[in-house]
Image: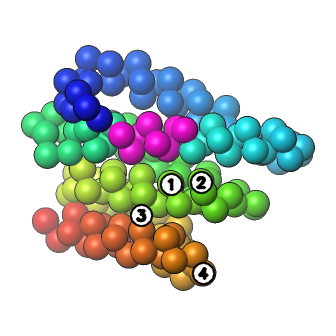
């Protein structure tokens, strides 16, 4: 975040590493509680990294460098949403990443986000958790802005 869009020279390496970590964390069925806790911690770290990257590139002339990674990130978010035993902390971070992605990339990914994450967003909008619901409302506004541009 501190180096902003100067991170572009590390972007390919970081995004590929995050993608591999996301794939490792994709399957939690049949795992014991300690391993599930580890996987949720890994997912949260991946999401925090994505968030920092998006925030670092926000309002930059280099945001287009992030566009090719959006489908894989959205796929990762969908895999988290489809998880039977969702972790509240991971869901909170995931909805914020969806917002950061939308806010940073805007109309470049508006329709892709609308197709991919509608069910996840709607679920978060009806959450009993105030923080999840509040984040989802911000994401919905960001998506509406991205689509209307």
Q: Estimate the spatial distance between the alpha carbons at disc 2 and disc 4, rounded to whole Å.
A: 15 Å
Question: Horizontal placement of 130 versus 84: left or right?
Answer: left
Magenta part of the chain: 45-52
Q: Circle 4 — which element?
A: loop
Q: Estimate the spatial distance between the alpha carbons at disc 1 and disc 2, rounded to whole Å.
A: 5 Å
Q: In the rendered structure, are the residues bearing label 2 and label 4 in contact, judged by CB atoms less than 8 Å apart?
A: no
Magenta span contains residue 94: no
- Is label 3 or label 1 in front? 1
In-front residue for pair 87/82? 87
Which residue in the structure is indicated by mark 4?
128
Q: Circle 3 — which element?
A: helix
Q: Does residue 118 appear anywhere in the picture? A: no
Which residue in the structure is indicated by mark 1?
93
Q: In the rendered structure, are the residues bearing label 1 and label 2 in contact, judged by CB atoms less than 8 Å apart?
A: yes
Which residue in the structure is indicated by mark 3?
115
Quick one: label 2 or label 4, which is nearer the N terminus? 2
Give the residue drawn at x 84%, y 41%.
34
Query: How crowded is the residue under tag 4: few (<14 C-alpha within 10 Å), some, or many (20+)?
Result: few
Question: Horizontal placement of 6 versus 68: left or right?
Answer: left
Q: Which mark is residue 90?
A: 2
Reply above or below: 92 against 148.
above
Give the residue drawn at x 78%, y 45%.
36
Quick one: label 3 or label 1, which is nearer the N terminus? 1
Reply above or below: 66 against 135.
above
Q: Estimate the spatial distance between the alpha carbons at disc 2 and disc 3, rounded to whole Å.
A: 22 Å
Quarter of image, res 64:
top left
In-front residue for pair 135/63? 135
Query: How crowded is the residue under tag 1: few (<14 C-alpha within 10 Å), some, or many (20+)?
Result: many
Query: How crowded is the residue under tag 3: few (<14 C-alpha within 10 Å), some, or many (20+)?
Result: few
Question: Horizontal placement of 6 versus 76: left or right?
Answer: left
């Amino acid at each position: 975040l501190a180096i902003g869009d100067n991170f572009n020279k590390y972007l390919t390496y970081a995004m590929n590493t995050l993608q591999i970590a996301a794939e490792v964390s994709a399957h939690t069925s049949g795992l014991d509680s300690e391993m599930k806790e580890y996987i949720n911690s890994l997912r949260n770290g991946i999401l925090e990294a994505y968030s920092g990257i998006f925030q670092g590139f926000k309002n930059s002339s280099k945001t287009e460098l992030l566009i090719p990674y959006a489908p894989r990130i959205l796929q990762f978010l969908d895999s988290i949403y489809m998880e039977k035993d969702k972790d509240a902390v991971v869901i909170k971070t995931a909805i914020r990443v969806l917002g950061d992605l939308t806010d940073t990339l805007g109309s470049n990914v508006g329709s892709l986000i609308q197709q991919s994450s509608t069910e996840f967003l709607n679920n978060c909008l009806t959450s009993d958790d105030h923080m999840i619901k509040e984040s989802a409302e911000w994401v919905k506004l960001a998506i509406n802005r991205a689509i209307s541009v």
